[in-house]
Image (cartoon, coloured by chain):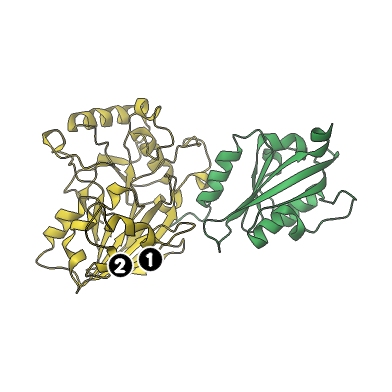
Amino acid sequence: MVDDGQHDLFLILARDLTSRLATPAFVVDAEGTLQYFNEAAEPVLGRTYAEAGQLRAGEWAAQWDPRDPEGRLVPLEDLPLGVALREGRPTHRPVRITGGDGLVRDLEVTALPLCPREDLVVGAIAFFWERAAVVG
Amino acid sequence: MRATIWGCRGSLASPGPETVRYGGQTSCLAVDLADGSLLILDAGTGIRPLGMSRADAIPRRIDLFLTHLHTDHIEGLRFFPPFWEPSVEFHIWGPPAPLRGLEQRLAPFFAPPFFPVHLRDVPSKPEFHEVRSEPWTIGSAVVRAELVKHPGPSVGYRIEDGGGTIAYLPDHEPALGADLESIERGWISGLGLARDADLLVHDGQYTVAEYAGRVGWGHSTMPDAITYARRAEAERLVLFHHDPLHTDDQLESMFAEARRTADGSAVEVELGHEGMVFDL
């Protein structure tokens, strides 16, 4: 029998790539389930991937409580990852989160869809960085 | 089903006295299904003698599965006699690509200045199919394809027929960016195709020393292929895609070294050679 736990090659390659990057990165599958975030993302998100593990879209959104810079809650579908998955296009916006360590951080988030074909999205990667770190 | 190796050399056809035991023809595996259907995996130069061997009984339908379009996997098609038979229903399956269809990508190989006949003028009028990840049925077999780690759009295949399973991943570098011993199985490229296969045909082109200078080229060492087969819990591994610069003696020396260094005790491992037949 084929192993149903087999990941799509694009997610395997995304994890391989982001695990080697110094830029924080967050990888989700086509359903928005968190599949991986890299070591560079850990201090920004306030927890390690080993602690977080796979989380469904609603679970990770609840975990980091994403808001706009004015503090208004941003629905999952309007987050950069939500737009990338839903519309199959790259997108960017500032997002305020509360890390697993309880600290509030203002981030810039760019999400890229993983599209083997124009009509197929198998996942997405979000790259992000702290705005304060850039400004200050 | 019965599988027969018609070519197991990688990259470049390499005939000559130093490759006579394992063969110099590039990738081609014929699979005769229980219901009599013929599936062909890749069209390296091995497909030419395969076609000649069937001259007296050309199948009405042929399904050719291309893992990718590197030359050593398509170069024999131009001299495969059934390809030129208008009575043959010819289906070509291959990996999807982001921008151009399979036929469009293959067509330049069948056009001047590389070849005098255009693909559109081939008498069998082949029908092209880009594989999807969902399994499908051909004859008595269930076939499944998945994208695997190899430069450019490349897939491996799994064929299940009559209770037997073949997994075919001739060009594959699963160890790229992954420790095959420790990584969770779901994160190993193509492992879903190879899981519990009766026969796994897998890339084993390099020695460990050679691989150090060829990381990212899309191929595996023999020890990595053995580790991969063990993680897949395959019953039998056939090492494939022999380097064109390796002589028979070198292959046997590499194989002995790989058997010493890799833990493959649970897997029956052999070097692939032309004419090798597997009844599954």
Contact between marks 2 and 1 (CB within 8 A): the answer is yes
* Residue at 34% across, 36% down: B265
Q: Position of residue B63 (x, y in %)?
A: 28, 65
- Seen in the picture, residue B206 relative to A58 is either above or below; the reply is above
The hue used for chain B is yellow
Q: Quadrant of residue A39?
A: top right
Q: Which chain is indicated by disc 2?
A: B
Label 1: which residue? B129
The amino acid at mark 2 is His
Q: Where residue B91 is drawn, which disc sits there?
A: 2
Relative to residue B147, is residue B167 drawn left or right? Answer: left
- Seen in the picture, residue B101 relative to B13 is either above or below; the reply is below
Q: CA–CA distance between discs 2 and 1?
A: 7 Å
Q: Nearer the viewer, residue A65 or A87?
A: A87
The reply to whether residue B41 is visible in this rendering is no
Q: Nearer the viewer, residue A72 or B254?
A: A72
- Work out which quarter of the rendered image holds the N terminus of chain B and state it: bottom left
* Residue at 16% across, 62% down: B81
Q: Earlier in the sequence, mark 2 or mark 1?
A: 2
Relative to residue A11, is residue A34 drawn left or right? Answer: right
Q: Quadrant of residue B11?
A: top left
